[in-house]
Image: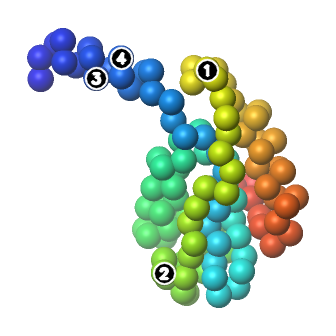
Amino acid sequence: MDTDRRKELLAAYKDRRPEMGVISFRCSVTDEAFLAAAADIPTRTNRIRFQLSTGNCPNRRLQELWARYGEDAFTIQAVERLRYDDPKEDHTGELETLLELCLLKDPKAAKLWR
């Protein structure tokens, strides 16, 4: 890959606006939901799926349900999306607040990570 193309790709990556918000892994059998704040929803979703498929999810209850019922028993979705202007700004606080609001709306939900 030539240098100009590499610089172009790097600039495009730095200027991207990742989809931020709260994701939910809901077990249809038990109706339990596990929520997580995500600065990049697709990336975080893939990471959690990989952890679950390899048996390395830090949330033991979610891992147990995944092992017992399989991926097909889960609905995985973004339940809330964060609107923001500056992708370079730190949105951690806003994401945590959004996560807490989602937890209040759904009494059967728990944080994916404590």
In the picture, the disc for residue 11 is 4
Find residue 59 and name its label: none
Secondary structure under tag 4 reads helix
Residue 72 percent across, percent down from the top left: 48, 81
Pointer 3: what residue?
9
Asked if the residue under mark 4 is in contact with the one under mark 3, i.e. CB atoms within 8 Å, the reply is yes
Q: Is residue 99 left or right of residue 81?
A: right
- At which x and y percent is residue 31? 71, 80
Q: Which residue is mark 1?
A: 86
Per the image, the residue denoted by label 2 is: 72
Between 49 and 88, which is closer to the camera in this rendering?
Answer: 88
User: Which of the two labelled residues, at mark 3 and mark 1, occupies the earlier sequence position?
Assistant: 3
Q: Earlier in the sequence, mark 2 or mark 3?
A: 3
Q: CA distance from mark 3 to mark 1?
A: 20 Å
Q: Amino acid at mark 4?
A: Ala
Image position of 31 with respect to 77: above or below: below
**49 in relation to 12, above or below:** below
Mark 4 or mark 2: name the one nearer the start of the chain: 4
Label located before the other in sequence (2 or 1)? 2
